[in-house]
Amino acid sequence: MEHIVALLFVVGCSSTMTDCRELEVPVSVFEIAQACVAERPFALGDLQGQAPRIIGKCLAVDPALEDDYDQIVWNVKSDGTLAASLEVSRTLLASNREHPEKDYVRQQ
């Protein structure tokens, strides 16, 4: 299995750039960063009409964190540029020693 090295992230915005939302693209993950860059203009062209302004960016994927990324943090700046990054949320897990997890392999 190959590693993902880039993710194509696209948002559509109102003409004033005040209201933006994520848009789905047919192919969003790439094994080669250059493939993402090459696909970007075609993906943006395919999405024309879904929003007055469409912006896309190829985000770098760290192979060591590929399975840990769980959110995309993004913002469209007033000049119309897209700032976006893949992030791993800082989740705190709690447990209760009085009620250990069931062992479903042995439990009937």
Image (cartoon, rainbow, N blue to C red):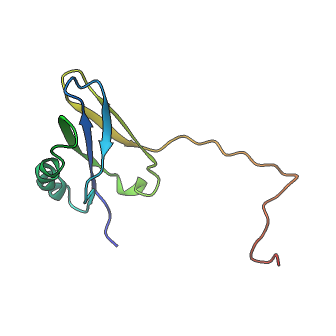
Count of numbered circles on the image: 0
| Residue 13 place in picture, x, y as percent | 25, 33
Q: Quadrant of residue 18?
A: top left
Q: Residue at x 76, y 48 (%)?
A: 95
Q: In this rendering, is residue 21 above or below 44?
A: above
Task: Indicate left or right for 40 with 100 as reference.
Answer: left
Quadrant for the N terminus, please.
bottom left
Q: In this rendering, is residue 4 above or below 97?
A: below
Q: Residue at x 25, y 63 (%)?
A: 31
Quadrant for the C terminus, please.
bottom right
Q: Residue at x 20, y 30 (%)?
A: 81
Q: Going by the picture, which residue comes out furthest to the front?
A: 49
| Residue 39 place in picture, x, y as percent | 14, 55
| Residue 3 place in picture, x, y as percent | 32, 64
| Residue 97 place in picture, x, y as percent | 84, 51
Task: Indicate left or right for 9 with 95 as reference.
Answer: left
Q: Going by the picture, which residue comes out furthest to the right?
A: 98
Q: Quadrant of residue 5?
A: bottom left
